[in-house]
Every structure is written in structure tokens, then in C-alpha cells.
Image (spheres, helix red, strand yellow):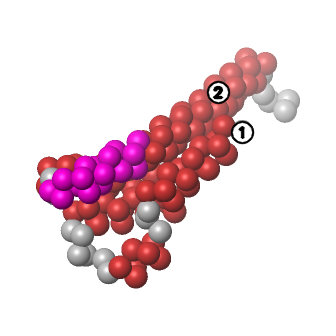
Amino acid sequence: MDNISPTLLWEIFKHVRSWLANLNRAGWQRKQQSKQALQNVILAARETAVYLRQFKDTGKPDHRTERHLATLWTKLGFELEELGLDKLAKRCHISGRHWADPEFYDADFLQQADISLQSMEKLAGQILLKLKK
């Protein structure tokens, strides 16, 4: 400690303070990104529910909408993976793949994967509640 000048000590202190502020800001930013991704899961579930209701009412599939849903769920899967929300990310990837090719997975796998809109929205909501604490 005898060899450290007050100026050097002050510079080290400023650097550590800046580093801690950046770390805190990164944590806040990550939390905001997580909230946004989770809110997007809820929005995607509701958008999908509207399409399913339309399909039920008309009996007509809309491949443009199905392509959109496949892309939407897949992108959400990637976002959630980057944020470390792996359980929900995996479900989103499965849902995206299922919208892209409904015959890719068998019914048993889909049931075990638990990709119902209600369960995905519920899981996203539960994680959102934890983030708000």
C-alpha cells in the first residue's frame, strides 16, 4: 500500500465505481428484456388463440398466418434462450416448429411438451411476477 499514490488510488476507486454502475445497469437492462420477452409470449398466445378461433369458425386454414405464428414462436424461443429462460424457450421452439409443420411431432410428444396456450401464458405470467419482486 505504501507504493500506491493517492491519485492512483482515486483512479482505481473511480474505475470500480464505474464498473459497478455498468454491472447494475446491465442487470436492469436484462430484467427489462426478460419482461418484454415474457410479455411477448403472452401476446403471441393470445394472437394464436384468435387465429384458432377464426379457424374453428370458418374451417379455413390461413397459411400466411400460420407462417407468421411459426416465425413468431421461434423468434420468441431464441429471445428467451438468450435470456436464460430455457424452459419456456424450449416450449416456444416446439410451438414454432409445430406451426411450421404440424406433422413433425406426434401427439404424445406434444402432450408431454405441454405447449398449450394456457400453460405457456401461465408460465410466462408466473415468471413475470417473480421478476417484479
Q: Quadrant of the N terminus?
A: top right
Q: Horizontal placement of 101 versus 46: left or right?
A: left
Q: Which residue was labeled with disc 2?
A: 21
Q: Residue at x 59, y 43 (%)?
A: 128
Question: Element type at marker 2?
Answer: helix
**Nearer-N-terminus badge (1/2):** 2
Residues shaded magenta: 43-60
**Callouts 1 and 2 close, C-beta under 8 Å:** no
Q: Horizontal placement of 116 versus 10: left or right?
A: left
Looking at the image, which is closer to me, 2 or 77? 77
Q: Residue at x 18, y 58 (%)?
A: 59
Q: Which residue was labeled with disc 1?
A: 133
Q: Is residue 103 visible?
A: yes
Q: Quadrant of the C terminus?
A: top right
Q: Horizontal placement of 105 versus 101: left or right?
A: right
Examine the rendered structure and indicate whether residue 78 appears above or below residue 101. Answer: above
- Determine if the magenta segment contains residue 4: no
Looking at the image, which is closer to me, 24 or 71? 71
- Determine if the magenta segment contains residue 48: yes
Q: How many marks?
A: 2
